[in-house]
């Protein structure tokens, strides 16, 4: 290795060309990288749906979803299996483990579903859609005034969707707030009886007439001619012209003679508006390999052109563009990055020679460029997380260059010049530098292999750190020595140079006159020193266990959008839903009035407001102005809005969400049982307990409210008339739900055509009692004559998890009480709960389950990483004991520093904090290696252990101090950042910055004390084995003998 270093140090052209190549590679990669707000997270999985129109949830469960569950249960690698049985459709969601081969997994799922042969004959083929994790990136509001019909607005929005989907860098586009089109041929009972027809006759006539049929082709000498019948109806007039019956007198009965054809929408109540205008949102969704900047540019250019040629009454605006959030967040991190880099550079200029400081700064840029060059290869995009990782690693990657540069600087202070100083200085520290970098990389490696929703976040950070460290090592060993090979001894002439020299030499003065005496005393009282440090570590653990430092799994981040959702009971009149919608809108207006009053009309809080009422579900999206231009945070706005909306006593759930990322409630428990009554009772008990805690709100379960259900029972003797239950059900279904006769392709979607009774009749119970049931011999009997009708409470939805009926109980909790409440439930409640509900199985899901899995994974990987690091250091130092000293003195006390930092700055401990602690441990290992490697070098020259420790500590004080100081000051701007957007990133900076400060004290005092204790232990066992006493460690610490041991370097 020494020969390689010498060759590169002696070949400045090669070093410069390597540096230029790395920088160019980084620039090219930066230009070509995808741009995302956050890393794209994807799990292999699928959503499988089977439609069986008109079937009840119970029938769907028994004949659709259970059969799908049984079929896919044999597929390997399933992580989560859940199903929902709604009226008319069963849906199965299958999520696989993250390390699966997605293609093979989906192929096996499809094969198992296709093998099911026992679905009802009326059920449609199963539809398998690949499960994608997608977010709305851009929302375009397409609005119409009162002159624009709903159908016209939808057709225009659909055309807009297709055109935007053709733009570059757009993964997918969806419409939100629309109803599916539908053609309803409505025939009254009176018309059927007048013409002697049934609904089946009308349906058969429409289905057999409105068709397009290919009939082959005619081959002739002139070529082939295709034969085709094209008589499929598409418009209202074409359906009205279909002949239903030929009369004996030659007259014909057309659809228009007996029915009303309505070319409209499915019978779902829907009202979606922006600023009072009916609106459809065209949503550009996220996807893999996405460049949000280019996407936004293309979409905005399209909208700018489109608004110039809009039809009368239609308007189009960009309602939300996440590229704005991306740019503001990247700018925020970039500003903190440059501020941190400037502080690091100033620190280096003060304490090292300017030439060294400047070349070290160039080395930072080279390492960053190298890291950028490799990120696309590792499928890492340029996003908020990866950008932050570069900010995080400033103070870490500069350590190698500082150690090498300071070693060369020390050589020049001792009189060596040029190439000799560069080579000798680098050789002196090459071992600790190489093994420190590898050790830090090993500490970050486990974060690449985690699974779960946070895996892409931790993977991005760890890869950036590892790649940057790799290139920092290359730069420090191959490029920096060449740049410093022309360094000459200092000969200050200017006042600035003399000032810089005085500041730089102040570290030497501190090392000689302050640190050295303290170190001698720490070594003399090494057991007391060790006890003090260990006591501090124990106390720091107490900060966590006693709740003084709160814990959260992932820091909460505020969104620039507030989402209000109200779920009303099934069967709620739509007029009531509209009243609740008006109540929400009134709350929004009251909030805006408050802001206007408090700011004298100068402040603005809300940028846009979208509302949608769909049957019993009410949704409001509130787009806030950027954080820097408003007086309230998103959390404060959401809390105030919830108060102003007021109570909705008949609502099942009301949620006001202002958070980004994972919106799952922090507390979620899944209850399983085959007994639905036992399940509901257990859910009520758990909800009652959760409501008793302070700081807990929105305690709900996912059981849909019961709906009124009309059931039919054949009367005695009805079978003798040739009527069966199936006949009654089929004819009632035909009239009320309708018989689907065909599907028309229109604007890329299927438009269903139904034959049924008129809507006014279908909304009347008297009409239901009197509808005619037709027998096989042509008789017509009223329903009440052949069946008893009774009202029952029915189930509107059945949810299952892991192949059993399930209820999920969830609750929102203030962040600082999550861990406390979970612990109290486990320790003081669930034992009695399980005894009271023996038929019910219980388990944590959602965030709690993910957190538990995360900690099991990370602890396993970290133990492996520490083992590998131990192996490396043991090989490097040819010792079994010293790696324990180096590693175990680093990691626990970085944790201690992080605890103190989180307490001082008021941040909860999160998984990002642990990443900061591991980064700090890398710096601490670096410092420990620098110290102990120099001790080894001195001892190889014949110096005893105590003298070598004091000599090494005094001489290596400067690089050890600078590595910790530059790390701390590089993160100082971020730790002082008050922006809401940066708050979730600050804990990792706190963990690293305060971890290295405490690690500095560990390296300077605790490690020497442990080294001395180790010498005592070795002396004791040596005495037991040989019987010969050896000089005690303290005997070598006479202050008068040691006062001239470490001379002050040359001025």
Image: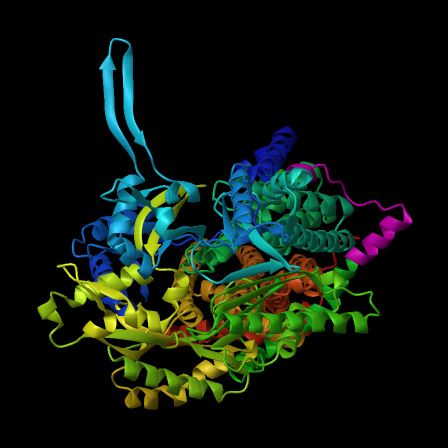
Instruction: Give percent across and percent down for residue 900.
Output: 62, 75
Q: Does the image show residue 852?
A: yes
- Position of residue 112 measured from the top left corner of the image (x, y, whole percent): 21, 52
The one nearer the camera, 1 or 477, is 477
- Which residue occupies 66% across, 56% down? 959
Taking 13 as reference, is 283 left or right? Answer: left
Image location of residue 674, percent across then percent down = 24, 77
The outermost residue toward the left is: 720
Estimate the x, y position of residue 38 in percent, counting from the top left: 55, 53
Above or below for 574 versus 870: below
Quick one: 594 or 492, which is closer to the camera?
Answer: 594
* Res 695 quadrant in image: bottom right
The residue lying at 74 percent from left, 61 percent from top is 628
Res 433 seen here: no
Task: Residue 710: say if magenta.
Answer: no
Q: Is residue 509 left or right of residue 386?
A: right
Look at the image and give the residue range highlighted in magenta: 481-504
Q: Is residue 356 left or right of residue 453?
A: right
Residue 496 highlighted magenta (yes or no): yes
Front residue of 252 and 533: 252
């Amino acid at each position: 290795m020494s020969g390689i270093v010498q060759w590169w140090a002696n070949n400045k052209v090669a070093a410069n060309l390597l540096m230029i190549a790395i920088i160019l590679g980084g620039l090219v990669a930066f230009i070509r990288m995808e741009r995302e707000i956050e890393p794209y997270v994807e799990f292999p999985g699928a959503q499988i749906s089977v439609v069986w129109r008109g079937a009840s949830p119970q029938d769907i469960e028994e004949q659709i979803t259970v059969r799908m569950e049984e079929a896919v249960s044999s597929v390997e690698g399933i992580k989560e299996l859940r199903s929902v049985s709604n009226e008319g459709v069963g849906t199965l969601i299958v999520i696989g483990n993250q390390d699966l081969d997605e293609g093979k997994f989906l192929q096996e799922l499809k094969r198992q579903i296709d093998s099911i042969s026992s679905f009802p004959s009326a059920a449609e083929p199963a539809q398998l859609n690949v499960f994608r994790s997608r977010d709305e990136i851009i929302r375009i509001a397409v609005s119409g005034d009162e002159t624009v019909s709903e159908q016209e607005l939808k057709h225009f929005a659909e055309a807009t969707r297709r055109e935007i989907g053709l733009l570059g860098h757009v993964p997918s586009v969806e419409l939100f707030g629309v109803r599916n089109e539908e053609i309803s041929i409505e025939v009254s009972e009176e018309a059927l009886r007048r013409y002697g027809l049934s609904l089946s006759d009308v349906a058969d006539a429409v289905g057999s007439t409105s068709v397009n049929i290919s009939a082959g082709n005619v081959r002739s000498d002139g070529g082939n001619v295709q034969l085709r019948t094209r008589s499929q109806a598409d418009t209202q007039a074409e359906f009205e012209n279909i002949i239903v019956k030929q009369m004996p007198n030659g007259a014909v009965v057309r659809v228009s003679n007996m029915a009303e054809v309505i070319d409209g929408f499915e019978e779902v109540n829907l009202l979606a508006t922006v600023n009072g205008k009916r609106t459809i949102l065209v949503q550009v969704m996220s996807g893999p390999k996405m460049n949000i900047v280019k996407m936004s540019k293309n979409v905005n250019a399209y909208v700018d052109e489109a608004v110039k040629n809009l039809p009368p009454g239609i308007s189009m605006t960009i309602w939300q563009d996440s590229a704005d959030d991306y740019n503001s967040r990247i700018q925020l991190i970039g500003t903190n990055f440059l501020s941190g880099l400037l502080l690091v550079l100033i620190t280096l200029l003060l304490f090292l020679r300017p030439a060294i400081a400047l070349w070290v700064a160039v080395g930072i840029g080279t390492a960053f460029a190298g890291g950028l060059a490799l990120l696309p290869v590792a499928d890492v995009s340029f996003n908020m997380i990866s950008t932050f990782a570069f900010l995080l690693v400033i103070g870490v990657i500069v350590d190698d260059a500082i150690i090498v540069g300071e070693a060369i600087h020390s050589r020049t202070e001792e009189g060596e010049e040029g190439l000799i100083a560069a080579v000798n200085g680098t050789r002196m520290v090459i071992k600790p530098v190489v093994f420190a970098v590898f050790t830090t990389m090993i500490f970050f490696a486990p974060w690449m292999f985690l699974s779960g929703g946070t895996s892409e976040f931790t993977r991005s950070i760890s890869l950036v750190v590892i790649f940057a460290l790799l290139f920092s090592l290359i730069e420090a060993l191959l490029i920096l020595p060449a740049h410093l090979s022309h360094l000459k001894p200092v000969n200050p002439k200017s006042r600035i140079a003399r000032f810089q020299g005085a500041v730089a030499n102040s570290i030497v003065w501190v090392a000689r006159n302050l640190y050295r005496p303290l170190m001698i005393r720490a070594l003399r009282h090494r057991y007391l020193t060790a006890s003090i440090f260990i006591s501090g570590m124990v106390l720091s653990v107490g900060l966590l266990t006693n709740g003084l430092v709160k814990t959260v799994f992932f820091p909460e981040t505020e969104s620039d959008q507030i989402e209000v959702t109200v779920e009303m009971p099934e069967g709620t009149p739509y007029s009531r839903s509209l009243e609740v919608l008006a109540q929400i809108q009134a709350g929004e207006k009251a909030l805006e009035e408050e802001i206007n009053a408090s700011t004298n009309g100068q402040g603005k809080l809300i940028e846009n407001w979208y509302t949608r009422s769909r049957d019993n579900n009410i949704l409001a999206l509130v787009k806030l102005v950027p954080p820097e231009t408003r007086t309230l945070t998103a959390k404060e706005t959401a809390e105030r809005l919830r108060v102003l909306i007021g109570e909705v006593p008949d609502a099942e759930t009301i949620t006001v969400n202002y958070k980004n990322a994972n919106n799952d409630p922090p507390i979620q428990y899944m209850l399983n049982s085959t007994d639905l009554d036992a399940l509901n009772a257990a859910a009520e008990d758990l909800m009652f307990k959760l409501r008793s805690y302070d700081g807990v709100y929105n305690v709900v379960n996912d059981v849909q409210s019961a709906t009124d259900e009309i059931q039919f029972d054949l009367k005695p003797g009805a079978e003798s008339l040739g009527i069966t239950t199936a006949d009654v059900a089929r004819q009632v279904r035909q009239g009320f739900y309708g018989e689907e006769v065909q599907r028309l392709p229109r604007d890329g979607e299927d438009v269903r055509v139904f034959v049924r009774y008129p809507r006014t009749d279908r909304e009347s119970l008297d009409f239901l009692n009197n509808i005619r049931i037709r027998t096989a011999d042509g008789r017509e009997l009223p329903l009440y004559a052949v069946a008893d009708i009774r009202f029952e409470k029915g189930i509107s939805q059945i949810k299952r998890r892991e192949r059993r009926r399930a209820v999920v109980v969830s609750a929102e909790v203030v962040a600082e009480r999550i861990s406390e409440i979970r612990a109290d439930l486990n320790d003081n409640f669930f034992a009695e709960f399980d005894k009271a509900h023996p038929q019910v199985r219980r388990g944590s899901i959602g965030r709690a389950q993910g957190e538990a899995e995360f900690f099991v994974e990370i602890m396993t990987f970290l133990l492996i990483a520490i083992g590998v690091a131990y192996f490396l250091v043991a090989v490097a130092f040819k010792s079994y004991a010293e790696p324990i000293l180096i590693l175990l003195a680093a990691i626990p006390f970085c944790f201690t520093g992080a605890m103190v930092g989180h307490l001082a700055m008021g941040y909860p401990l999160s998984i990002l904090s642990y990443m900061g602690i591991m980064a700090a441990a890398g710096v601490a290992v670096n410092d420990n290696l620098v110290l102990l490697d120099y001790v080894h070098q001195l001892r190889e020259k014949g110096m005893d252990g105590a003298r070598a420790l004091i000599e090494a500590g005094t001489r290596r004080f400067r690089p050890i101090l600078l590595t910790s100081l530059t790390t701390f000051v590089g993160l100082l701007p971020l730790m002082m950042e008050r922006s809401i957007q940066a708050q979730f990133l600050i804990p990792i900076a706190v963990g690293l910055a305060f971890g290295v400060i405490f690690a500095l004290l560990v390296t300077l005092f605790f490690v020497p004390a442990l080294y001395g204790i180790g010498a005592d232990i070795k002396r004791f066992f040596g005495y037991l084995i040989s019987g010969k006493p050896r000089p005690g460690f303290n005997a070598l610490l006479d202050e008068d003998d040691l006062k001239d041991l470490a001379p002050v370097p040359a001025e």
